């Protein structure tokens, strides 16, 4: 059964900058792999590593942020190509939710389909959250989808998420494939009523 997601708690990592596209999230050369299994290893590969594999100065390479489960990003995160590898790399790295000023619609939809909420907040809230976690990486962060709030320590900030997506998380219906499989008899019944599925014999 698809899990219900109402709260996401953990520590957070700040990813600074606006208009971070999917090619920066996961470079195109990694798309040739036939499964998503190792996508987490390639998250922000060019921003995190030199060509020889040595680490660059990047938040995900910093000890204080290595176990973060929430990512705080800027405006228009996930723009560019619609590659689903980008959300997959984020989830498989260990990130369970993102807070940003705004997200690409396709990227946000791809995140929803794998159970990763992308909630939005004002520019001032994003700046405050990034400042808090940069100064104190172990600050506990909790995203409450029911209350539409994010807490950072003892501070609380409003967040938004489209009602349809919030509903899919809090009711456990965000996985469309699992939803179809759980209603397979209904799917077959409907398919049997469609002329193009029955060779126009009905």
Image (cartoon, rainbow, N blue to C red):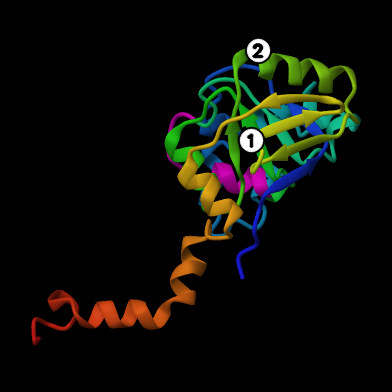
Whether residue 34 appears in magenta in the rendering, the answer is no
Q: Quadrant of the N terminus?
A: bottom right
Residue that carries the numbered disc 2 in the rendered image:
124
Residue for point 90% across, 22% down: 136
Compared to 153, does 113 lie above or below? below
Secondary structure category for the residue under label 2: helix
Where is residue 61? Give x, y as percent: 82, 31
Q: Is residue 163 left or right of residue 192?
A: right
**Quadrant in the rendering for residue 41:** top right
Whether residue 87 appears in magenta in the rendering, the answer is yes
**Quadrant in the rendering for residue 106:** top left
Of 135 and 120, which appears nearest the observer?
A: 120
Q: What range of the chain is rendered magenta?
A: 79-91
* Dots 2, 1 in contact, CB < 8 A: no
Residue for point 60% across, 53% down: 170
Q: Label 1 neighbourhood size at 10 Å, few (<14), some (14-19), many (20+)? A: some
Compared to 25, does 109 lie above or below? below
Residue for point 48% across, 68% down: 179
Q: Is residue 172 left or right of residue 72?
A: left
Count of numbered circles on the image: 2
**Quadrant in the rendering for residue 25:** top right
Q: Is residue 44 left or right of residue 69?
A: left
Q: Residue furthest bottom?
A: 201
Q: Label 2 neighbourhood size at 10 Å, few (<14), some (14-19), many (20+)? A: few
Q: Which mark is residue 148?
A: 1
């Amino acid at each position: 059964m698809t899990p219900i997601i109402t709260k996401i708690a953990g520590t957070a990592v700040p990813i600074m900058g606006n208009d971070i596209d999917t090619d920066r999230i996961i470079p195109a050369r990694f798309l040739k792999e036939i499964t998503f299994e190792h996508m987490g290893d390639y998250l922000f590969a060019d921003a995190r590593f030199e060509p020889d594999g040595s680490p660059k100065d990047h938040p995900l390479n910093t000890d204080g942020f290595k176990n973060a489960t929430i990512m705080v990003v800027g405006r228009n995160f996930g723009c560019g190509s619609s590659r689903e590898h980008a959300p997959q790399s984020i989830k498989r790295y260990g990130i369970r939710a993102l807070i940003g000023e705004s997200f690409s619609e396709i990227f946000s939809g791809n995140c929803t389909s794998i159970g990763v909420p992308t909630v939005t907040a004002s520019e001032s809230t994003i700046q405050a959250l990034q400042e808090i976690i940069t100064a104190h990486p172990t600050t506990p962060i909790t995203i409450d989808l029911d209350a539409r709030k994010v807490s950072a320590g003892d501070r609380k900030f409003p967040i938004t998420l489209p009602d349809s997506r919030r509903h899919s998380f809090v009711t456990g219906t965000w996985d469309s494939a699992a939803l179809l499989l759980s209603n397979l008899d209904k799917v077959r019944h409907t398919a049997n009523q469609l002329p193009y599925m029955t060779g126009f014999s009905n």
